[in-house]
Amino acid sequence: MHFRLIFAVNAFLLILFSGVAQVHALPVGAPSRTLDAGGFSLTGLIGYTDMEVDDRDVSSKSFFLKGAFGGAGGITPYFKLGFADLEAGSFEGSLDFGYGGGVLLDIFTQRSGREFRVSLDTQVNWVESSEGSDSRDLFEGQLALFGSTKSGGTQTYGGFAASFLKLDSTDENGKGHLFFGIDYFMDFNFFFNAEAHFFGESALILGVGYLF
């Protein structure tokens, strides 16, 4: 427990102070809690992001499928496959293939009374967007520290994320943002997700998923 806490805090501070911004929003939820060992979830996500990178207005639409696996010890690895575009200045890229993955880790859990968790989410994502013969390769990474609480079928969560991107051969750009979201679980294993990013980037991500 102490080792995982020390590792999580140090990793978060390393990214936070390294000054390394994302274009396509990287959601933390859907779901925001780790899965029980052996569990699996599948979620469809649609998102829109608008922000400034190097004094340029940049926007992106994304459509991704996220699969998460319940591991031992409060660890949930996941993968993402889908499509995203990129608009920056005069460049208006089309929807192209994207993929990525990450790990969600609980560093503190209180189960007595109202459930409360402190979690760390780290993920990376690759997208290529093209306009005619011109294409852009985008690499994104994000590290998020957040708290979540569960009441009935509703889990709310919020925290801070440090993110970075590398577009083609340009230098890495980065900043932080706040986020807030809700997972709503239904009795027959379906769940819905909504997540917003602000103060650093403007983004809205909506999702629907199923717990197996």
Image (spheres, grey):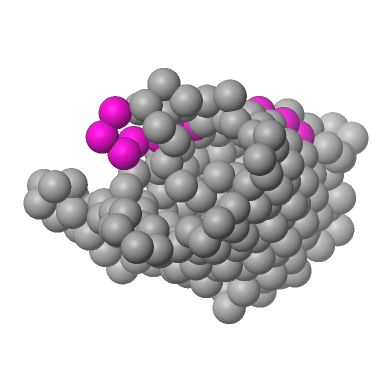
Q: In this orientation, does residue 18 appear?
A: no
**Residue 21 image position (x, y, % from top left):** 54, 61
State the residue at coordinates (65%, 52%): 184
Q: Is residue 1 left or right of residue 12?
A: left
Taking the spot 89% from the left edge, 35% from the top edge, the residue there is 132
Number of callouts in the render? 0
Overall secondary structure of the magenta section: strand
Q: As drawn, is 116 to the left or to the right of 54? A: left
Give coordinates of residue 130: x percent, y percent.
80, 37
Q: Residue furthest bottom?
A: 199
Report if residue 77 lies within the magenta region.
yes
Q: Which residues are magenta?
A: 72-83
Residue 52 seen in the figure: yes
Answer with the quarter of the image where residue 15 lies: bottom left
Q: Residue at x 55, y 56 (%)?
A: 152
Q: Percent from the top left, x then y, of residue 137?
A: 64, 38
In depth, the one of 176 and 33 nearer the eye is 33
- Residue at 64 percent across and 34 percent down: it is 189
Task: Say above or below: 93 vs 75.
Answer: below
Name the outermost residue toward the right: 132
Residue situated in front as seen by the camera: 121 or 41: 41
Q: Is residue 88 above or below residue 81?
A: below
Point out the image quarter for the C terminus: top right
Q: Is residue 127 left or right of residue 83?
A: left
Residue most toward the left? 2
Residue 38 belongs to magenta span:
no
